[in-house]
Image (cartoon, helix red, strand yellow):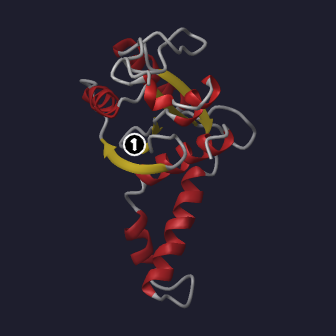
Amino acid sequence: ELTGPLQPSCFQDKCNRPLCHSSMKLRDYVSVNICDIIILHMKYLGVDYGKKKIGIAKSNFDGTIAFPESIIAPDAQNKHIDSILDICKKEEITNIVIGHSIDFDGKDNAIEADITAFIEKVLQANPTIAIHRFDERMSTSGAQAMLRHTFQKNTGEKHKGANAKKVRAHTKDDDAKVAAYILQGFLDKNGRI
């Protein structure tokens, strides 16, 4: 049985960035081909960028299911970049999916300039990270609708409009869930199901 460590450069993306870690063993990839390795064994970080809050989500090891992780507050000292890269390092994540904020006519929203600056700072701090963009239209409203439905179902509300204040309070800190919604959309679209 071959169990030696893989070299970090053994599998690379189109930009020649490594797709595996030196701590991984060849036996981790038994009976799969090279395409399966890239698809089956890659974790992702999802980001819903906002000026006041940044929602963070991560995928499972196989890159098939997204989970809300946390909410980070951006600051002028860029500690939020360090926090995100710390999560990537701890979780061995080399791919970040960031929502592309566009309107229904396909034009960039005003916050897209801030998102672009954020991406540049992430890549400056760690040029080995691969950044993927995903259309986030309807992600906030989609995630909020799902949360409202779950809340109403779990509380036994019979009328959709009943206790709207409670529903809004329940869904106000949904940035991490929106990040998970964006990440899941990316994973589904790219065959990670």
Q: Residue at x 38, y 12 (%)?
A: 124
Quadrant location of the N terminus in the rendered image: top left
**Residue 47 lies in quadrant:** top left
Return the residue nearer the eye: 23 or 3.
3
Residue 84: x, y in percent?
A: 33, 31
**Residue 154 lies in quadrant:** bottom left
Vertically, is 162 above or below 112? below
Q: Is residue 175 visible?
A: no
Return the residue nearer the eye: 185 or 73.
185
Query: Which residue position holds label 1?
Result: 56
Give the structural element (helix, strand or loop) at label 1.
strand
Residue 54: x, y in percent?
A: 38, 41
Name the residue type under label 1: Ile
Return the residue nearer the eye: 167 or 15.
15
Total residue callouts: 1
Residue 7: x, y in percent?
A: 41, 11
State the residue lying farthest toward the front: 1
Residue 175: x, y in percent?
A: 42, 50
Q: Residue at x 37, y 57 (%)?
A: 173
- Say few, some or many: other residues with alpha carbon within 10 Å of mark 1 (under 14 / 14 to 19 / 20 or more): many
**Residue 103 lies in quadrant:** top right
Vertically, is 104 above or below 24? below
Return the residue nearer the eye: 9 or 85.
9
Vertically, is 171 above or below 72? below
Q: Residue at x 52, y 31 (%)?
A: 30
Q: Is residue 53 visible?
A: yes
